[in-house]
Amino acid sequence: MRSRQFKSNRNKNKGFTLIELAIVLVIIGIIIGAILKGQELINNTKSKRLQSDLKGLESLLWTYYDRKGRWPGDCDIDGYIEYSPNNASSATDSLSSTTDPVAESCGAATPVENQNTSFADLRSSKVATFSTPNATLARNVLNSAFYVGQADDTANSGEKVNVIVAYEVPAWMAKMLDVSLDGIENGTEGRVRRWDSAVVGTSWPTDANSDTLVSVSYMFDRVLP
């Protein structure tokens, strides 16, 4: 009787076999792989969306130029947008949330040439939706923003160029954007450059620091040497 009870209890406390453990580990591996693959797809989608948003804003700028003969935010019509975005990973100047852009545009009685002027010009001319606030129009897929202004290479050639700057971009995404638009990953040449360190660009963070947030400039009208 005791022997039977001992066997019964032993059977009840019996653990997983090696085969069962192997099956569990395989299932866990499949789940982890699916999660990683899903995250990769999400990241790739965000990267492509960032590029699409960037090119969409560039298209608005060129449409305005074709219509007005100057860039939005270039109130003195010298070929360069007056505002200079800050060289940092995050923007320091806030964009307006007002629904009426006229007072912030070059067409205002006393225009104030700042980070809002380019977007206000786009809206007041109806190139962009009039009632869409600047902050909304400039927002990108990373829930940060694009700023439009000039890069003044005073330390080197002294030349100027107009840029779109995207802030708070993970380094890995900035590299993907660089390769997609310039065909090379370096951050110092071509239209796409690292902006948070210098106007003319510096190298991207190493792969070990791929989540480091940087700002990225895109020279849409011409390229600095």
Image: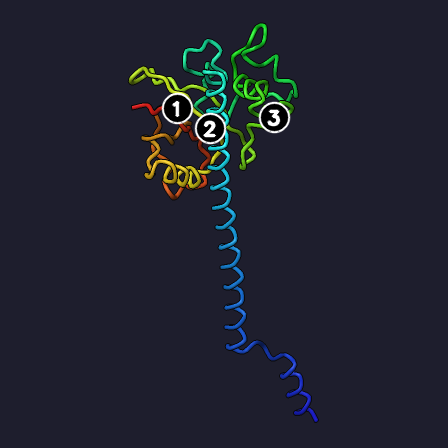
Task: In this rendered view, identify the residue nearer to me: 25 or 156.
Answer: 156
Label 2 belongs to which residue?
58
Residue type beneath disc 2: Glu
Mark 1 touches mark 2? (CB < 8 Å): no
Label 1 belongs to which residue?
221
Quarter of the image with the C terminus is top left
- Relative to 113, does residue 132 appear above or below in the rendering? below
Task: In this rendered view, identify the residue nearer to me: 179 or 66.
Answer: 66
Residue type beneath disc 3: Thr
Quarter of the image with the N terminus is bottom right
Kindly identify the residue that appears in the image at 66 percent across and 83 percent down: 9
Residue type beneath disc 1: Asp
Instruction: Give the percent coordinates (x, y) of residue 59.
Output: 48, 29
Helix, strand or loop at label 3? It is loop
Kindly identify the residue that appears in the image at 42 percent across and 37 percent down: 174
Kindly identify the residue that appears in the image at 42 percent across and 41 percent down: 172
How far apart are labels 1 and 2 at the CA level? Answer: 9 Å
Label 3 belongs to which residue?
129
